[in-house]
Amino acid sequence: MVDVQIATAEKKKITLPNLRVLWQFVRPHRRTLVLGMALGLVGTGAALATPMVAKGVLDGLGSDASLVQPILLLVSLLVIGSLVLYLQWILLGVLAERIVLDARKSIVRKYFGATVGSLGTRPTGELVTRVTSDTVLLREAASNALVSIVNSVVGLVGALILMAVLDVVLLGAIASAIIVIAVMFSRLMPPIAVAQRQSQEAVGRLGGILDGTLRAIRTVKSSRAEARESERVISEARTSAQHSVRAVKISALAWTFAGGGVQLAIIGILGLGGYRVSTGALAVSSLIAFLLYAFQVMGPVQELATNITALQAGMAAAARIRQIDDLVTEVGQEGTVRSARATAPAPALEFRSVTARYAPGKEPAVRGIDLEVPARGHTAIVGPSGAGKTSVFSLILRFLTPESGEIRLGGTPYDELTIDEVRARLSYVEQETPVIPGSIRENLLFTHPEASESDIWAALESVHLDSTIRALDEGLDTDLIGSTVSGGQRQRIALARAIVRRPEILLLDEATAQVDGRTEAAIHEVIRAIASESAVVTIAHRLSTVLDADTILVMEDGVVRARGTHDELMITDSLYRELVAALRIGDNTALPTPTVGN
């Protein structure tokens, strides 16, 4: 009863709107779909003609008429029906794969065109299920189910019309059964759709939890949380199974009633038809032909039951896929890079009274920021957690759009540049330094695909990884995902990827967080070399990074509260002194004694 109430509440939501969404995926291939339907109709016509030809054969048994022609016609109908079925099978199979491919291309392009913030609102595993499992359900609904439903309806209607030609009285018995079955299906299909949708949503949550847990598998194991995390994932799997089982039970009830109802009607036809034959109101051949049509009706009825269920699942999948339309697309992606570097002398980056927030109604992440990053030199950004350091990087990279104020790149406002033009002049190294699926070579060429072999080895040498890579059996072609790469090596690969070609502006979210002292010194040499001819901006988490900077910006609560060199800030800013005291842990660098408080 509860399921029926839920289905009634969501019936409108799941049927017509989702059917329109499903049609959006099918529409580009409608000509192929129509051809598939036409082939199906030919096959259906051959099947519908067979009982009538069989009736002619039976009628000819009592006469001297030759049976060769009707038998040849029966064989021809069989051959034509089989050939058409073969062609339709291939056509619909190809159509299904094209629909899935188009859907997957659309989803993937939407993902990579969306803003970082909107992608971050959904678990990665759930996004992946849209591309994998949901598109498979879409395939079945968008090709086989739609065509089979049309063919089944045509076969059913055609059989009923020919039954009426044979005997209207017997038609009443089979028609009554079909009407009862149709009413029952209209009540049972919405709960099936609800259960299918809930099952798919549970699978999406399962993927999200599993993805996040596997990414943190070291933490999970070290925290002895294997059993707890396993149960979290299994709980979603169990929920999905429960909804699927409910859909199976309702579907089984529908199929049982459909098959049983038609068979009961056939029994009634046999009894009633036998009586009408005994009274001379109906010929035996007509009764046999009618029974053949009655048996043919069973096929379309059962196919309708199966394919309507598949259609419900496909519509739910289509609706889930279309949810990605809610993702916010980056503005200003179009266009090609017009120039690699600024020609006029100007700061590399300028923030002019920039305020930004991640969502309407939330507190600003940064407020009224004014800053300049010179075309050459090293600028470090420090501050406590939540000060707005990462937000500044997000604004520079156009992951976040200012609510007010202006950002300039080489003197040109961001509004006059495409996203590609901005990012082509930047290189960015994340703190978590993710590696891209693929080989070491593919990772190093990821930002600059046009880089030469010598560029690659020069970058590796600068981060002290060249000898390590050369010692690998497959060298640059070593698969990073399938091999064991330490955190420090991953960080150095990410830095090498950024400097394969010298960038105009290098953004580093603490590039020395996971490396040893010797490698850290080498990385600082690289930073100094790049800073001598380009701009380097770092979010600093270690004292050595701060000391190397030409200019240090101190952030707090989304604003820049102080700026200057290390020595200047040690004298003038109390928060900076506190930060340095924290950053100094593990460092042996002597600090100047402050003489003036802030």
Image (tube, grey):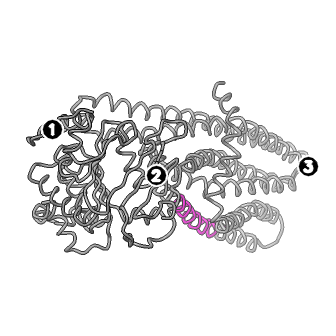
Dot 1 corresponds to which residue? 584
Magenta stretch containing residue 98, yes or no? yes
CB under 8 Å between discs 2 and 1? no
Q: Earlier in the sequence, mark 1 or mark 3?
A: 3
Q: Which of marks 3 and 2 is nearer the N terminus?
A: 2
Along the viewing direction, whichever of 17 and 97 lies nearer the viewer = 17
Q: Name the residue under label 3.
A: 281
Q: Does the magenta stretch include residue 499?
A: no
How many marks do you count on the picture?
3
User: Disc number at residue 132?
Assistant: 2
**Residue at horizontal 64 percent and vertical 52 percent from the top:** 21
Depicted 80 relative to depicted 400: above or below: below
In the image, residue 398 lies at what x, y percent? 44, 55
Asked whether 88 or 595 is in front, the reply is 595
Whole-Å distance between the Cαs marked 3 and 2? 59 Å
Q: Residues within 10 Å of mark 2 (few under 14, many from 20)?
A: few
Q: Residue at x 58, y 33 (%)?
A: 249
In the rendered image, residue 199, in percent from the top left (x then y), is placed at: 52, 38
Please report the bounds of the magenta region as a residue range.
Answer: 81-103
Rounded to the nearest angstrom, the CA distance separating label 1 from label 3 is: 106 Å
Query: What amino acid type should be assigned to the residue bearing mark 3?
Result: Ala
